[in-house]
Image (spheres, rainbow, N blue to C red):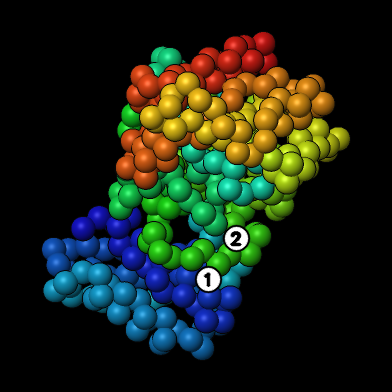
Amino acid sequence: MKENEIMKMLYDVQHPAKGDRNIVELGMVDKIDIDGNRVTVTLAFSKHRDPLAEYLIGSTKAALVRHIPGVEAEVKTIVKDEGKKPVGLNLGIEELVGVKHIIGVASGKGGVGKSTVAVNLAVALARLGYKVGLADADVYGPSVPKMTGTEGEVPEAYKEGDKEVIMPLEKYGVKWMSIGYFARPEQALIWRGPMACNALKQMILQVRWGELDFLLIDMPPGTGDIHISLVHDIPLTGAVIVSTPQAVALADVEKGVNMFRNESIKKPIFGLVENMAWFTPAELPENRYYIFGKDGGAKMAEKYGIPLLGQIPLVQGIRESGDAGEPVALSSRPDGEAFILLAGKLADAVKDV
């Protein structure tokens, strides 16, 4: 049993008086000691004793017993100044100094296949010989673990002086990081904006990325707190916008484009990806059915003076590969080659930046 695995278990222990935030998010887990089948967790309280201390002690012990058969669980407490901030929230950009290009993969609305594009784009860039990482910043709906076949894995974390460093998982030639690695698949992350922003910063700024040509950030849909935090606190090179051809999706894409072009942000948009551009059944590979409309993304790109980086077809194999944890960009099929072409165009677009 490792310390980071136990830390994941403690996400179950919520503080009823703190908006049901858990003791890990609140910075209350001061120390974890492991000695054979004995696990001792030390909780840190403020100098004013928490009236729910006994409840939290009992809940912490119960979480350990529930997850670790035969464990001898002990919970200790210490008192710290209540002005002390949780570890990991006051972070710099030191871990990003070896990253050449940080690209946000964004969409105006959900359901357009943004994460599918982000994961396959990362794999395609790796196939082209680039050093690539992907941070899953969609903290409310992390899908990278499922789409990469890394569900259930827990990244290693270790102390480096006063700083905690998280090591990304590596698979398919890409370094992956997601909040989904630290929460159960069925766990709903009911977080307010500041909590989500802090989690996002940790998923990017606390990770030992090393030398990368590209770090893709799979952003959540919309233009809210998380996006504002991202563009102001992370040195983004620019963004790629993902949409489907239908009018309702394109209307929201305009909001995303305008956000990146806002005077207070001013980040370049390297291009638009039209996902689900047409449907091609496997038994009729030459046929194209424009279920969501034809060339809507191309027209939107032209309207805003944005390059159309690629048109990705709606193919059953893309969905099946994602569900199986084997991105379609690994294949040499036409749908896989579409992402290779997309990756090449993105690499060309950032050369002069």
Q: Which corner quadrant holds the N terminus?
A: bottom left
Instruction: Tell me the kind of residue under disc 1.
Output: Arg
Check whether the beta carbons of the residues at disc 1 and disc 2 lie within 8 A of each other. Answer: yes
Residue 112 visible in the snapshot: yes
Whether residue 277 is situated above or below residue 204 in the rendered picture = above
**Residue at x 67%, y 35% (from the top left corner):** 293
Q: Nearer the viewer, residue 173 or 312?
A: 312
- Callout count: 2
Give SS at disc 2.
helix
Instruction: Tell me the kind of residue under disc 2.
Output: Met
Pick whichever of labels 1 and 2 is earlier in the sequence. 1
In the rendered image, the residue lying farthest to the right is 263
Expressed as whole percent of the image width and height from the top left, the position of residue 18 reads 57, 76
Q: Mark 1 sits on what residue?
A: 21
Residue 103 visible in the snapshot: no
**Residue at x 51%, y 63% (from the top left corner):** 189
**Residue at x 63%, y 64% (from the top left corner):** 192
Tell me the quarter of the picture where residue 217 sits.
top right
Q: Mark 2 sits on what residue?
A: 195
Whether residue 345 is situated above or below residue 4 in the rendered picture = above
